[in-house]
Image (cartoon, grey):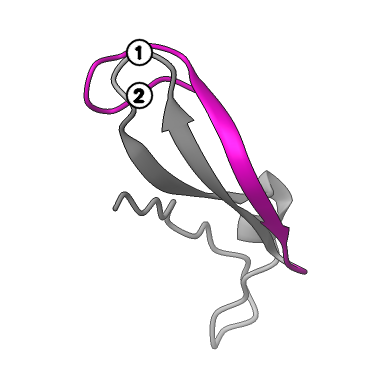
Amino acid sequence: MTCPECGEKTKVLESNDNEDFVERRRECFACGYRFNTIEVDKDLYERVVNRNDKKVKGERKCRFG
């Protein structure tokens, strides 16, 4: 993954696995910027069902901070 500030490579500081997603704390090698990522399995979006029992695609969520 690349740093949102400078575009260089990052390293994972810690990782928390949940049932539906993985939350990772990352740090940039070059500038030291720290941020969080939430990684969701692609198949999770297809398991979302609306009121008409049709499969709908979810929206990707990513949090920086």
User: Residue at point 52% right, 57% down?
Assistant: 57
For mark 2, what is the residue? Answer: 3
Membership of 5 in magenta stretch:
yes
Identify the mark at residue 63; answer none if there is no mark: none
In the rendered image, which quarter is residue 35 located in?
Answer: top left
Q: Secondary structure at mark 2?
A: loop
Asked if residue 50 is positioned above or below residue 11 in the image, the reply reads below
Residue 30: percent from the left, percent from the top?
A: 35, 13
Membership of 3 in magenta stretch:
yes
Residue 28: percent from the left, percent from the top?
A: 40, 24
Asked if residue 28 is positioned above or below residue 40 in the image, the reply reads above
**Between marks 1 and 2, how big is the CA–CA gap?**
9 Å
User: Residue at point 64% right, 48% down?
Assistant: 14
In the rendered image, which quarter is residue 6 located in?
Answer: top left
For mark 1, what is the residue? Answer: 30
Residue 53: percent from the left, percent from the top?
A: 65, 80
Q: Which span of residues is magenta-colored? A: 1-19
Residue found farthest to the left: 5
User: Residue at point 73% right, 67% down?
Assistant: 18
Q: What amino acid is at disc 1?
A: Ala
